[in-house]
Amino acid sequence: MSSNNPGFATLAVHAGAQPDPTTGARITPIYQTTAYVFQDSDHAAALFGLKQFGNIYTRIMNPTQAVLEERVAALEGGTAALAVASGHAAQMLVFHTIMQPGDNFVAARKLYGGSINQFGHAFKNFGWQGRWADPADPESFAAEIDDKTRGIFIESLANPGGTFVDIAAIAAVARKHGLPLIVDNTMASPYLIRPLEHGADIVVHSLTKFLGGHGNSMGGIIVDGGTFDWSKSGNYPMLSAPRPEYGGVVLHETFGNFAFAIACRVLGLRDLGPAIAPMNAFLILTGIETLPLRMQRHCDNAMKVATWLSKHDKIAWVNYAGLDSDPNHALQTRYSPKGAGSVFTFGIKGGLEAGKALVGGLTLFSHLANIGDTRSLIIHPASTTHAQLTEEQQIAAGAGPDVVRLSIGIEDPEDIIGDLEQSLAGI
Ligand SMILES: *Cc1c(COP(=O)(O)O)cnc(C)c1O
């Protein structure tokens, strides 16, 4: 890249990648290998002792993965990143790095249903407690914090309700209590929101969604903002205490403002193992090249569909922050002026049964549990993604029994609306 300060679309195509030095291949190759030959024994010892950077084994790093990491770190404005097998694996490694058994963290109550399950069930087996707060009320996070709290977790744009969160206000609470703010930026993508600019310390993504963008590969990523002082409180021994795994090295001391990404890799990924497949890293990297184009089209299409639905007499309500009348509109224009995202919910008159009939009558939309595909997708969260939750949790998560969720694709908007129109006509 010739420019010293390349723009977002340029970074999306180029960041982290060069033509392959051996073959001249212009596209980053799929390095489909498990291991890498050492130059000699000293080289091997230096790599294993964290004295030198280099490839050892694909559970820990891979050259295709490395380009993906550099690209997403550049797009988010972070110091470094770690790509892993899924969004959930990214979350697991983040908490593995900051939590000890008996510690807790405070999370927004409005989250992806899978994250509510992970925090409320699986994490209990590690002795980590997830506590809940209201993302619309920053002080409700403060009320849950005690001397065992190690972090705050929110989504910048909450799934499935499509609700924007006042990131800076929650970051202020985190800063006041000396805690890192972790933001799941999956739904917005860095094209719409860059949480590190609003006070977040760590960003996580499910790459499976908008970054990959084509519904063809699982992946997750952790972006280190380089902003948090891991040594100050003594509460983060993975970063601030000598690590017996590496001859007593103190990661924060040695790696400074990218120590968190290093810790997630050399303590978390190395020992817990959720590595991303090189093929998936390649597909996601290819997807990212068109992120700015796709994301704008997703937003523009979603705005047209939401506007159309809001005037339809069989629709009870539409919850899309892009609509002037939406209570979340002011936060959307402040945090995400380019658009309100692709995912939103609405309520159909006639409730559960009418919702099922609507889903059943569609032909262009796919009925499935995913978001962020090029294709338009539909789901009834209460019977699928959020089915494991109690009705109270479903309503709190914006996924009550009457709610239908759309993830608007990049097809022609007339065709998306036409499909909804013909199905609604049959109800
Ligand atoms: C899908 C999703 C996740 C989990 O990611 P996986 O790649 O499915 O593990 C986490 N957060 C949000 C907001 C998601 O949409």
Image: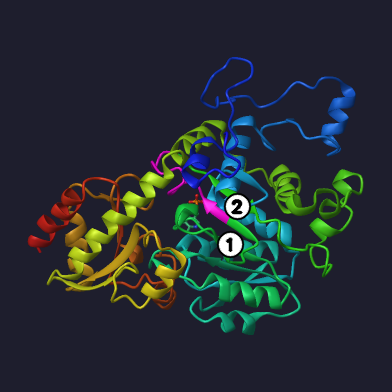
* Image: 258 above or below 162: above
Q: Residues within 10 Å of mark 1 (few under 14, many from 20)?
A: some
* Circle 1: element type: helix
Magenta residues? 204-216
| Res. 202 image quadrant | bottom right
Q: Quadrant of the N terminus?
A: top right
In the rendered structure, are the residues bearing label 2 and label 1 in contact, judged by CB atoms less than 8 Å apart?
yes
Q: Is 211 part of what is drawn in magenta? A: yes
* Image: 83 above or below 304: above
Q: Residues within 10 Å of mark 2 (few under 14, many from 20)?
A: some
Residue lying at 18% horizontally and 55% vertically, measured from the top left: 360
What residue is pinned by disc 2? 77
- What is the magenta segment's predominant secondary structure? loop
Tell me the distance, in whole angstroms, between the alpha carbons under discs 2 and 1: 8 Å
Q: How many marks?
A: 2
Amino acid type of the residue that numbered disc 2 sits on in the rendered structure: Gly
**260 left or right, relative to 167:** right
Taking depth in this image into account, of 419 and 3 the one nearest to the observer is: 3
Q: Is 226 part of what is drawn in magenta? A: no
Amino acid type of the residue that numbered disc 1 sits on in the rendered structure: Glu
From the top left corner, tell me how far across and down residue 265 is, in percent. 71, 45
Taking depth in this image into account, of 353 and 312 the one nearest to the observer is: 312
Residue lying at 72% horizontally and 70% vertically, measured from the top left: 103
Residue lying at 48% horizontally and 66% vertically, measured from the top left: 111
- Would the CB of label 2 be found within 8 Å of ligand 1? no
From the top left corner, tell me how far across and down residue 226 is, in percent. 71, 56
Q: Is residue 131 visible?
A: no
* Image: 264 above or below 137: above
What residue is pinned by disc 1? 197
